[in-house]
Amino acid sequence: MTEKSSNNLKTDFIDNISHELRTPLAVAREFSSIILNELASKVNKFQGVL
């Protein structure tokens, strides 16, 4: 394996890992925003304390 292909593999690996970590965080952030801004409906006492 050449040094260039080794560096490409490392770069691809890091890109994939960072994508896999960012995706669930973005979903959680957007869902939290919907809840906190009460865009879906009002939050009642059974759904949590804000």
Image (tube, grey):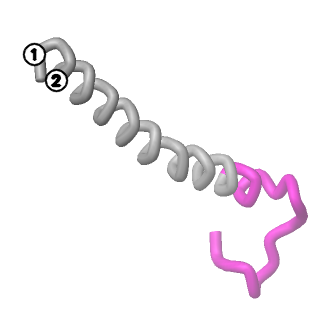
Q: Residue at x 65, y 56 (%)?
A: 32
Which residues are the magenta region?
A: 33-50
Q: Nearer the viewer, residue 4 or 21?
A: 4
Q: Residues within 10 Å of mark 2 (few under 14, many from 20)?
A: few
Of the numbered discs in the image, which one, if any, rests on residue 19? Answer: none
Q: Quadrant of the C terminus?
A: bottom right
The reply to whether discs 1 and 2 touch (Cβ–Cβ < 8 Å) is: yes
Q: Amino acid at mark 1?
A: Glu
Image position, residue 39 (x, y; %): 86, 53
Secondary element at image label 1:
helix
Image position, residue 2 (x, y; %): 11, 16
Image position, residue 13 (x, y; %): 30, 35
Secondary element at image label 2:
helix
- Outermost residue, right side: 41
- Outermost residue, top side: 4
**Residue at mark 1 to residue at mark 2: CA–CA distance:** 5 Å
Q: Nearer the viewer, residue 9 or 18?
A: 9
Q: Quadrant of the N terminus?
A: top left
- Outermost residue, front side: 1
Q: Is residue 23 above or below residue 48?
A: above
Q: Please check the rendered image and state whether residue 48 is part of the magenta-colored stretch, yes or no.
A: yes
Q: Nearer the viewer, residue 17 or 28?
A: 17
Q: Quadrant of residue 35?
A: bottom right
Image position, residue 5 (x, y; %): 21, 18
Q: Amino acid at mark 2?
A: Ser
Of the numbered discs in the image, which one, if any, rests on residue 6? Answer: 2
Q: Residue at x 29, y 33 (%)?
A: 14
Q: Residue at x 89, y 64 (%)?
A: 41
Q: Which residue is mark 1?
A: 3
Magenta-highlighted stretch: main secondary structure? Answer: loop
Q: Quadrant of residue 11?
A: top left
